[in-house]
Image (cartoon, rainbow, N blue to C red):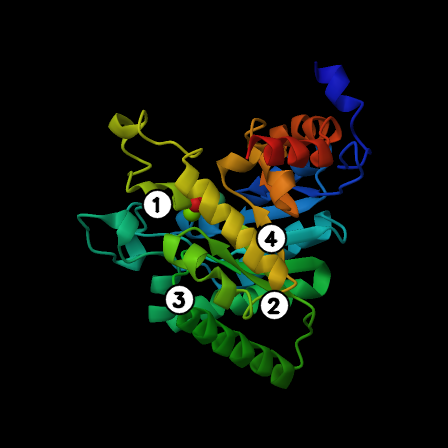
Amino acid sequence: QHALLLQLKGLENVTLDGRKIHVYANIGNTGDVGAVLQNDADGIGLFRSEFLYLESKDYPTEKEQFKAYKTVAENMAGKKVVIRTLDIGADKQIGYFGLPREENPAMGYRAIRICLDRPKVFKTQLRALYRASAYGNLAIMFPMIVSVQEVRRIKTLVEEVKTELRKEGIPFWDGVELGIMIETPAAAVMSDVLAGEVDFFSIGTNDLTQYTLAIDRQNRKLDSFYDPHHPAVLRLIRYVVESAHKAGIWVGVCGELGADLSLTETFLAMGIDELSVSPSYVLPLRKKIRETDVGKALERDAAEG
Ligand code: PEP
Ligand code: MG
């Protein structure tokens, strides 16, 4: 099995009928880049930046963050690296943030809400990201978006950061793509409008399932109710893909569902442009893609109504 997978290294992620798709990897630490390259991912579709904050005793400085992002960008040697800005909340203990306990942390003061509320903390991360963009193919994405207003506020802060860096003579790449996670029902429903504001979408199926089905993803008692194949979730995903393509932007899936091989055909038929999965799933997913015929799948779906 292992040897068989190794034979897939260097091959394209292309279906039997010629549809190409990007297969990227999800990572949570700079040390994971080795596994990404070993498994021959086309890029990094989700770099969770929380580790920098969790490992640190105080707010990580711009310099510390810059070094981490630069290392990943350089090691990926021109391949795309999508870094997600801070996504913490009351469920993750970070003392120096001074977050009060909450009854319902998943729906609480978290992620982009904290960043927009504490622009100094947010801008430190944005500056580090833009500085690192001079060293590779970086993209930035923002978690837990629910509204167009949030995206506009983010873009204003990004412009401020770029202006500052220009004034200071610090180099950065002007081509950095800005994207958002689609992981709330609000973002999925508003995706037609949101698509006009950003360069890409990445669908976070873990949270999208949690919020759509009103099922706490941390509550093990609810495991048997947690159904990411629920038609409501799949309908939202289909709509998000349609919205993205109408606006001419790319759309990926970076939640666990991207690695669910029983859905690969469905995602390809929907037109998903990218799937981002744990490094160990990259080659099994490539195998699945190369065995799939999207045209046939679409014909069958049409026949089944
Ligand atoms: C998701 O919600 O699907 C996701 C990819 O983000 P996280 O698992 O980090 O919440
Ligand atoms: Mg999430």
Residue highlighted by disc 2: 130
Circle 1 residues within 10 Å: few <14, some 14–19, many ≥20: some
Read off the residue under disc 3: 147
Report which quarter residue 36 is drawn in.
Answer: top right
The tag earlier along the polypeptide, 4 or 3, is 3
Counting every numbered tag in the picture gives 4
Q: Which quadrant, please, contains the N terminus?
A: top right
Decide which of 71, 265 is in the foreground and name it: 265
Residue contact between numbered discs 1 and 3, judged by CB atoms under 8 Å? no
Q: Residues within 10 Å of mark 3 (few under 14, many from 20)?
A: some
Q: Earlier in the sequence, mark 1 or mark 3?
A: 3
Q: Position of residue 165 (x, y in %)?
A: 60, 78
Q: Residue at x 52, y 53 (%)?
A: 240
Which residue carries the number 1 mark? 212
- Quickly name the residue at label 4: 251
> Label 1 is placed on what type of residue?
Thr
Looking at the rendered structure, the secondary structure element under dot 3 is loop
Q: Residue at x 32, y 52 (%)?
A: 89
Asked if one can make out residue 204 in the rendered structure from this viewpoint, the answer is no
| Relative side of 211 to 294, left or right | left
- Residue type at mark 3 is Ser
Q: Nearer the viewer, mark 2 or mark 4?
A: 4
- N-term mark: 4 or 1: 1
> Where residue 16 appears, x then y in whole percent?
79, 31
Q: Residues within 10 Å of mark 4 (few under 14, many from 20)?
A: many
CA separation, marks 2 and 4? 22 Å
- Disc 4 vs disc 1: Cβ atoms closer than 8 Å? no
- Dot 2 or dot 3: first in sequence order is 2
